[in-house]
Image (cartoon, rainbow, N blue to C red):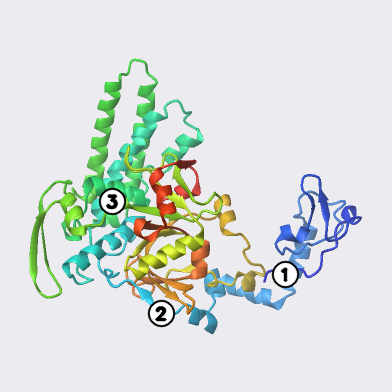
Amino acid sequence: MGANVSTQPELPAKASTKKQSEVFNEKMGYFDLNQHLRGLSLDVGNYENTDKNPISTESLDTWETKLLADPKNVLAQNAFAKNAIVDVIGTSNSETLSKDKYLFNVEVETIGSPSYFNNQNASGRCWIFATSNILRTHVIKRYNLKPDHFQVSQSYLFFYDKLEKANFFLDNIIDTTEEPLDSRLIQYLFQAPVSDGGQWDMIVNLVTKYGIVPHELFPDSAQASASSRLNYIVTEKLREFALILRGLLTDEATSEQDIKTVKQSMMKEIYNIIALSLGTPPKPTDSFTWEFIDKDGTFKSFETNPIDFYKTHVKFDAAKHFSLIHDPRNPYEKLYTVDRLNNISNGKPIEYVNLELSVIKKTAIKMLKKNEPIFFGSDVGKFSNSQSGILDTGAYDYELGFGTSLKINKEERLRTGSSQMTHAMVITGVHLDKAGVPVRWKIENSWGDAVGEKGYFLMTDAWFDEYVFQIVTNEKFVDPKTFNIWTKKEYSVLPFFDPMGALA
């Protein structure tokens, strides 16, 4: 694969006194040049009198001649001119088709239908949808409901997340008055104070404080389904309010009570904007009647409220579930958090136990065998086909199209900003070979049932290796050592700009 050279390239004259397989570097000593080049073919010539800039009329002419001398490159150029790159380099051979079959020998027994209120549309609420798909599973099982007849309200959690994030932002502004306005931290805070995205521990904060309601009690509005304009309005107001607060906080005449009064008034305005856009949801202790007909045709009715519905009817204790991550940059078997990352002031911090990937996979398989769907975070935009629903590192052949392949690994992608958690979904199955090794995984996405296999996606195990960063589990599925790492709360704090702070 790649443009590997079988022998060492001829080196420029100044280095030719060394063996061709060795080059001396004062800081590093002797090393194998090819090991660092990752298969790059050196175009070695006489550069004694050339400019430092390798782009010249002469080099452009040489590069063009060499490129178009190969008829395959002419064909590729013509194909790319009229088609999307991924359509040209997408693989479709029999080996790939066989590997990517929607066939799994371990699946959870009950999961809600992807066709029933499971489309986040033009919003970044995947983490809320993934959570909703897990929560509704427990309600469907408990009350013998049809899979396509029940969903929890994603918009309910979305409303309170937006409101709490606005408050969290203003608290951060108050806390960072001494920072220059153009500092990296302040610019980070200003960037996206009410982002649609979130993390598992933010869910814990929301359901603990606000509970859950059925979808029919607070369905999506147009603004929940397409949230960009709402986000724009709220973000601009928060930036405006932040400047006001920073001005007041530098004025010695301003009292602590003045700041509290001003902030309260600001939050009222933010509430008005969100409520006008999304509607006014029930408050955590507002009573409502939940009615349904189960699979057997039996009518049932319960008087409840959001907090009670979560505790009594969902009966899923989110606070007892925690995140395992695979971050090859940092030491394993340690607990991490991210500075300034949360949705609720003084809420539960973001918590990640960093483990080897093999341990994470074993945990996931245990969960699936016990009928537990799995919340997970990944970088969904890499080597994925959103229409077919295939997540496969072999989905696209860059070598065939461009004569070179992508040779940057998981750790390097994290270090260079190439990769991070961008999307949360739910693992609902796995296909194991005769030795019990995973081959592919079944995924419930939140993009509706018109994509993938009626809303389900397929993830190869190789894709899991490269682009899955997180799963959520509980004490039953990990060893005591891992659980102890989580419960001891001895954090290593990652900076606010760390890719593990990305919101799925």
Which secondary structure lies at badge 3? helix
Q: What residue would you read off at disc 1? A: 67
Task: Spot the residue most to the right.
Answer: 17
| Camera-nearest residue between 58 and 421 | 421
The kind of residue tagged 2 is Leu
Q: What residue would you read off at disc 3? A: 158
Q: Position of residue 164 (x, y in %)?
A: 29, 42
Q: Position of residue 126 (x, y in %)?
A: 35, 58
Q: Position of residue 255 (x, y in %)?
A: 30, 19
Q: Residue 432: in sight, yes or no?
A: yes
Neighbours of disc 3 within 10 Å: few (<14), some (14-19), many (20+): many
Image check: 3 left or right of 128?
right
Which secondary structure lies at badge 2? loop
Question: In the rendered image, which quarter contains the N terminus?
Answer: bottom right
The kind of residue tagged 1 is Leu
Q: What residue would you read off at disc 2? A: 103
